[in-house]
């Protein structure tokens, strides 16, 4: 492995050995071989690369004495600076952890510090516009002093020399003897507060966990800044690629007329012709999430939907030779470009061609960038160091000498050293409140107001549109509804209220979803807002993440809770962390609908009967809702939609499949499990805030408190009716919200009777019941408590399911045992 010290020493020695250029050229001139860059642009790329390399060294230096907390380096990947230069600073970028040079160049672009090409330099973009060779300058004497060359063809009167024959920015100096010399300005030294220094300070603040870091504010080391259109991500394994696909699809839908939501935060100000760039390395190319994203992109292109995404794969050769190229080339629907990442001129030309193609065609492409493994992540060939390659380009093209570039490297190094020492004195996050402030803001008053505004609109200006959408018969006039019907009606009302709302998932449009809950929505709102996707949960959530980032309000459906587990990192690592990593500058509001929990008849077996919710409840900031009754489902869904708009909340709406079409509670035909749909004028009064339970009183309601949720509510009410016949009064508490738990309601209702039976249809280990009991203990509850829970088993097929799941009979017996104490 090449150590930081070895790499630094080697680069310094190589720079010093480059010597002076044979022919001196001004920085404003284009490359002499007709390349797509000017000298000034090549120097800016070198500055970005140098800054990134020195940040790697600074990170190691800081960690050496316990002040640096992140040392994933970009060494060997610095060619991606040329890719950044080929894009616009307004193109959203999702960068992997080795993208230091890209970030530094993007910062320079946004600050106007990346030089523009001369008007007569052909653009580097477009496959049909190859770069042409500019007219070469005159020959210069090899004996000219450093910084100047003698012009052998000058006339006696230097004033007669045409300015066009001189290098850009050059001047003529006449000595006392009348001899004329063309003088090219010396290479300017970097300013101490230029854009590269500012970008370096951003990164250094992340390394030392400074609260002043502009993206995550000391919570994590990320490449991210809203004003640079750099979306933060901590992933190096490709889990951010599905979001990039979703963002590209959403941008194209917005460009074609879709409307963003009108929530408190404006939609991200992406230009209409923006290109999404998403970088990853060769190791991530084999990761399941990257494979899913590339597959989904190709599938959409195959079906005619446009996704303007440029995937950037930095390949350092860790995989089997030729494997990454073969994999990327074979992706249907994705155009393939390749470049040598150690050659900034070639990379810039090809990247510009790729970006221009994506921008014009609004179709996806991948740029396969060959890189080298240096420092911590390999024993790469240091002779292929991209910094050295760029330095050679500057010297052989006549823009600078090796000693000048070495001096520039050293000067930038001292800048970073001083900045590193300064950021060490900046404050760190010092309290839990500071850390979690942007994790998941909860503003219940504003959410309640949003629900009231939706009600006022539906009952007022939106009356006509609502009547048309429901075929002249709104749901409040159709009689009692089941759980599934209530959710369907609430989704329709949500789409009427928020024009940026989109419902999607596998077969949600064509078939109405597995259980028919979205039936008819596409006919009412069109294929642009209700559409089918591939049956891949990672990609479905990724589409939601990107759509939310673009300003839409996505409502994706996952077919079964079982299938969500394979894609949970899209919720944990991507969705839930967005505000945390950006201090609220970016957000991805989303309401994920999931048919879940188990059916006592074991229909479908394990695939259709999953009672595992622990992984969801463990995600910080995630809202987990479980409606049991129709008259709760609609207001809870309205709350989730409002919270997503107002606070950027990520909500998981788990719908009990066993209760979708149930109509009865106690006896066949009693219709006690249906409910009238509330007309809009009552929505505000019936609003269900996040974290508030519902309580049912059975009999005197003074003897026993049963705390439950989902299917357990119906079973517990049946058990409570049996107990009432035995003279036991019960209060049944429907938690409704599993994250955050309604702790205040739990404690109040538990204390009212002093006897608590927790009915948990999830597993005994890691189930919701553990959280309820912990809340009781933490708040000093001193009464009796007992738990009835499902066994620690997967749900088997058929009648065997009853042996592991909770039943009304088990609840009744558990209550009797508790009361007998």
Image (tube, rainbow, N blue to C red):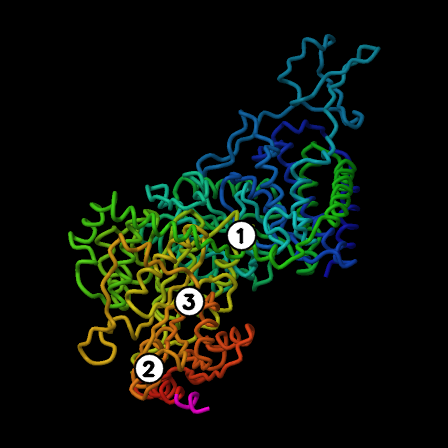
Q: Quadrant of residue 708?
A: bottom left
In this rendering, the answer to whether 543 lies above or below 745 is above
User: Residue sitting at 26 percent across and 48 percent down?
Assistant: 458
Q: Nearer the viewer, mark 2 or mark 1?
A: 2
Where in the figure is residue 12, as x and y percent of width and height?
A: 78, 46
Position of residue 632 in the picture relative to residue 153 (left or right) = left
Position of residue 370 in the picture relative to residue 512 (left or right) = right
Residue that numbered label 3 is attached to: 737
Neighbor class of circle 3 (other Cα within 10 Å; few <14, some 14-19, many 20+) is many
Neighbor class of circle 1 (other Cα within 10 Å; few <14, some 14-19, many 20+) is many
Circle 1: element type: strand
Identity of the residue furthest to the left in this view? 472
The segment highlighted magenta reads 816-821
Whether pointer 2 and pointer 3 mark residues with C-beta atoms closer than 8 Å, the reply is no
Residue that numbered label 1 is attached to: 279
Q: CA distance from mark 1 to mark 3?
A: 37 Å
Q: Quadrant of residue 461?
A: top left
Where in the figure is residue 329, as x and y percent of width and height?
A: 46, 55
Position of the N terminus, as image quadrant, is bottom right
Residue that numbered label 2 is attached to: 720
Q: Is residue 819 magenta?
A: yes
Q: Main secondary structure of the magenta part?
A: helix
In this rendering, the answer to whether 413 lies above or below 596 is above
Query: Which is nearer the eye, 701 or 68?
Result: 701
């Amino acid at each position: 492995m090449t150590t930081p010290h070895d790499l630094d020493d080697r680069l310094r020695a190589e720079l010093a050995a480059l010597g002076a250029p044979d022919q001196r050229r001004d920085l404003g001139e284009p490359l002499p071989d007709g390349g797509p860059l000017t000298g000034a642009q090549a120097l800016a790329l070198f500055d970005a690369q140098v800054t990134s390399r020195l940040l790697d060294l600074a990170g190691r230096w800081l960690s050496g004495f316990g002040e640096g907390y992140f040392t994933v380096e970009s060494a060997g990947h610095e060619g991606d600076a040329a890719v950044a230069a080929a894009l616009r600073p307004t193109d959203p970028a999702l960068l992997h952890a080795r993208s230091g040079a890209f970030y530094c160049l993007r910062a320079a672009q946004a600050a106007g510090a990346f030089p523009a090409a001369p008007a007569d330099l052909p653009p580097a973009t477009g496959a049909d516009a190859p770069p042409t060779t500019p007219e070469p300058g005159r020959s210069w004497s090899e004996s000219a002093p450093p910084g100047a060359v003698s012009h052998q063809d000058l006339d006696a009167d230097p004033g007669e020399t045409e300015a066009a024959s001189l290098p850009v920015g050059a001047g003529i100096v006449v000595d006392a003897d009348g001899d004329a010399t063309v003088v090219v300005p010396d290479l300017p030294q970097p300013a101490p507060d230029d854009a590269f220094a500012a970008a370096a300070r951003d990164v250094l603040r992340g390394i030392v966990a400074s609260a002043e870091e502009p993206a995550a504010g000391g919570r994590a080391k990320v490449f991210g800044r809203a004003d640079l259109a750099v979306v933060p991500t901590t992933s190096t394994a490709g889990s951010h690629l599905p979001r990039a696909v979703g963002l590209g699809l959403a941008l194209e839908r917005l460009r074609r007329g879709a409307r963003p939501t009108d929530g408190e935060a404006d939609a991200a100000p992406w230009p209409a012709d923006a290109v999404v760039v998403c970088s990853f390395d060769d190791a991530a190319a084999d990761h399941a999430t990257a494979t899913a994203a590339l597959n989904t992109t190709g599938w959409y292109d195959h079906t005619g939907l446009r996704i303007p995404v440029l995937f950037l794969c930095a390949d350092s050769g860790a995989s089997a030779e030729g494997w990454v190229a073969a994999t990327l080339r074979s992706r249907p629907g994705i155009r393939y470009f390749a470049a040598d990442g150690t050659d900034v001129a070639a990379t810039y030309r090809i990247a510009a061609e790729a970006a221009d193609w994506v921008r014009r065609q609004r179709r996806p492409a991948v740029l396969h960038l060959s890189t080298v493994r240096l420092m911590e992540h390999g024993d790469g060939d240091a002779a292929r160091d991209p910094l050295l390659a760029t330095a050679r380009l500057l010297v052989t093209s006549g823009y600078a000498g090796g000693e000048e570039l070495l001096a520039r490297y050293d000067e930038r190094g001292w800048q970073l050293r001083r900045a590193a020492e300064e950021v060490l004195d900046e404050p760190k996050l010092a309290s839990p409140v500071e850390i979690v402030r942007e994790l998941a803001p909860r503003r219940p008053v504003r959410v309640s107001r949003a629900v009231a505004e939706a009600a006022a609109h539906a009952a007022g200006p939106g009356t006509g549109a609502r009547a048309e959408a429901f075929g002249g018969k709104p749901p409040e006039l159709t009689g009692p509804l089941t759980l599934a019907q209530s959710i369907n009606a609430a989704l329709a009302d949500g789409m009427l209220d928020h024009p940026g709302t989109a419902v999607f998932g596998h077969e949600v449009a064509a078939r109405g979803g597995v259980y028919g809950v979205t039936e008819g929505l596409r006919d009412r709102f069109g294929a642009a807002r209700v559409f089918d996707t591939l049956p891949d949960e990672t990609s479905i959530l990724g589409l939601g993440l990107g759509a939310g980032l673009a300003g839409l309000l996505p409502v994706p459906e996952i077919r079964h809770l079982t299938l969500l587990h394979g894609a949970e990192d899209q919720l944990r690592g991507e969705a839930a962390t967005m505000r945390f990593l950006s201090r609220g500058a970016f957000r991805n509001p989303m309401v994920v609908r999931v048919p879940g929990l188990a059916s006592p008849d074991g229909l479908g077996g394990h695939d259709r009967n999953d009672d595992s919710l622990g992984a969801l409840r463990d995600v910080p900031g995630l809202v987990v809702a479980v409606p049991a009754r129709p008259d709760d489902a609609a207001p809870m869904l309205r709350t989730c939609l409002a919270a997503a708009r107002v606070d950027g909340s990520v909500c998981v709406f788990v719908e009990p499949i066993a209760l979708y079409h149930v109509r009865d509670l106690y006896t066949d035909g009693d219709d006690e499990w249906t409910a009238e749909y509330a007309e809009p004028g009552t929505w505000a009064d019936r609003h269900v805030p996040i974290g508030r339970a519902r309580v049912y009183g059975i009999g005197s309601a003074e003897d026993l408190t049963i705390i439950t949720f989902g299917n357990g509510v119906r079973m517990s009410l049946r058990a409570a009716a049996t107990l009432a016949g035995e003279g036991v009064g019960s209060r049944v508490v429907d938690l409704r919200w599993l994250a955050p738990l309604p702790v205040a309601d739990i404690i109040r209702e538990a204390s009212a009777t002093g006897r608590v039976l927790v009915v948990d249809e999830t597993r005994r280990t890691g189930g919701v019941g553990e959280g309820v009991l912990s809340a009781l203990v933490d708040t000093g509850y001193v009464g009796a408590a007992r738990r009835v829970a499902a066994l620690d088993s997967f749900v088997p097929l058929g009648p065997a399911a009853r042996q592991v799941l909770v039943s009304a009979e088990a609840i009744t017996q558990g209550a009797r045992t508790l009361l007998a104490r």
